[in-house]
């Protein structure tokens, strides 16, 4: 993911600089205890197995070191919804609706339908969207449209139009379509491009961009989204004051504290 790569680099760079500030002084390694009977297994569903890790030595860190970890974690959380939105344009609407149902439904939670709904939601959480994290195929629901409508009605939750229909139909079936000969932009659900943008559109748009210094060519399109507005191509840039501006401002705040 474009922003994910940039944020990951920023976090790594911050940690690197922080570590190197203390490079001249010897580091005393504190003795830490590892729990031998620790249960690493959390849960298993569909084709996913969740595990957890011990963090031995956390209490041995200085307050300054613990603050660094906290600030970097908060920076990552601030950008979480950017990744969801980049993965698919309806992901956030779907996630919020499903979470509302999960938190507020007071009906039968022992039925096969509810178990199927719960598994689907967990898969969506794990994949940061409705497409499989490895295969890029859209996740299949094992519950019916009528059942979801019942859950939405009983929890006073709204999910309509394309965002509802896409859970059950064959539209946007691949997050990223790499098939040879296919229009990889038009047939990919990933949200780096708006609806109706094609391979040809992207190639034409960026072919017209010229780097100020040909010897140091710029990589255009790495921090932007290409959309069509009134038939015209327009580039929306991820930045403070631009696309995802408020989330990026929050990321910047936490990285500055770090």
Image (spheres, helix red, strand yellow):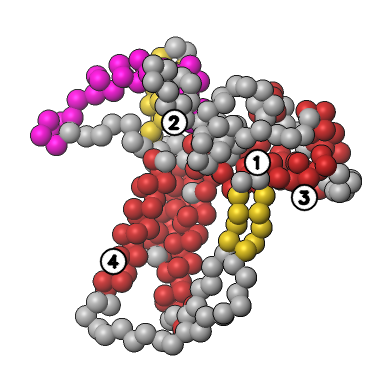
The chief SS type of the magenta part is loop
Q: Earlier in the sequence, mark 1 or mark 4?
A: 4
Counting every numbered tag in the picture gives: 4
Q: Which residue is mark 2?
A: 192
| Disc 3/disc 4 C-alpha distance (Å) | 42 Å
Q: Which residue is mark 3?
A: 103
The answer to whether 195 appears left or right of 141 in the picture is left
Q: In the rendered image, which quarter is residue 65 located in?
A: bottom left
Q: Which residue is mark 1?
A: 95
**Vertically, is 237 above or below 170?**
below
Q: Which residue is mark 4?
A: 17
Kind of element beneath mark 3: helix
* Marks 1 and 4 close (CB-CB < 8 Å): no
* Marks 1 and 3 close (CB-CB < 8 Å): no
Q: Which residues are magenta?
A: 189-216
**Is residue 44 among what the camera can see?**
yes
Kind of element beneath mark 4: helix
| Disc 3/disc 2 C-alpha distance (Å) | 31 Å
The answer to whether 156 appears left or right of 232 in the picture is right
Instruction: Report crowding for label 4: few under 14, some 14 to 19, many 20 or more residues within 10 A (C-alpha).
Output: few
């Amino acid at each position: 993911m474009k922003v994910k790569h940039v944020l990951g680099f920023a976090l790594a760079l911050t940690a690197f600089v922080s570590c190197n500030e203390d490079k001249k002084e010897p580091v005393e390694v504190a003795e830490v205890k590892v729990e031998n009977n620790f249960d690493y297994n959390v849960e298993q569903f569909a084709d996913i197995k969740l595990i957890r890790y011990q963090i031995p030595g956390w209490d041995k860190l200085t307050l300054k070191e613990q603050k660094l970890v906290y600030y970097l974690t908060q920076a990552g959380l601030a950008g979480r919804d950017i990744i969801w939105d980049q993965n698919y344009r309806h992901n956030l609407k779907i996630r919020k609706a499903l979470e509302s149902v999960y938190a507020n439904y007071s009906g039968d939670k022992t039925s096969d339908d509810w178990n199927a709904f719960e598994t689907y939601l967990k898969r969506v959480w794990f994949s940061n969207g409705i497409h499989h994290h490895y295969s890029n195929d859209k996740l299949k629901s094992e519950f019916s449209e009528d059942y979801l409508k019942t859950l939405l009605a009983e929890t006073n939750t709204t999910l309509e139009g394309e965002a509802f229909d896409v859970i059950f139909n064959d539209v946007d079936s691949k997050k990223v379509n790499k098939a040879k000969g296919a229009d990889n932009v038009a047939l990919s659900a990933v949200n780096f491009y708006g609806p109706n943008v094609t391979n040809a559109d992207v190639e034409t748009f960026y072919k017209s961009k010229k780097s100020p210094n040909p010897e140091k060519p710029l990589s255009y399109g790495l921090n932007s989204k290409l959309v069509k507005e009134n038939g015209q191509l327009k580039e929306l840039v991820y930045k403070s004051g631009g696309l995802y501006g408020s989330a990026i401002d929050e990321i910047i705040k936490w990285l500055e504290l770090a």
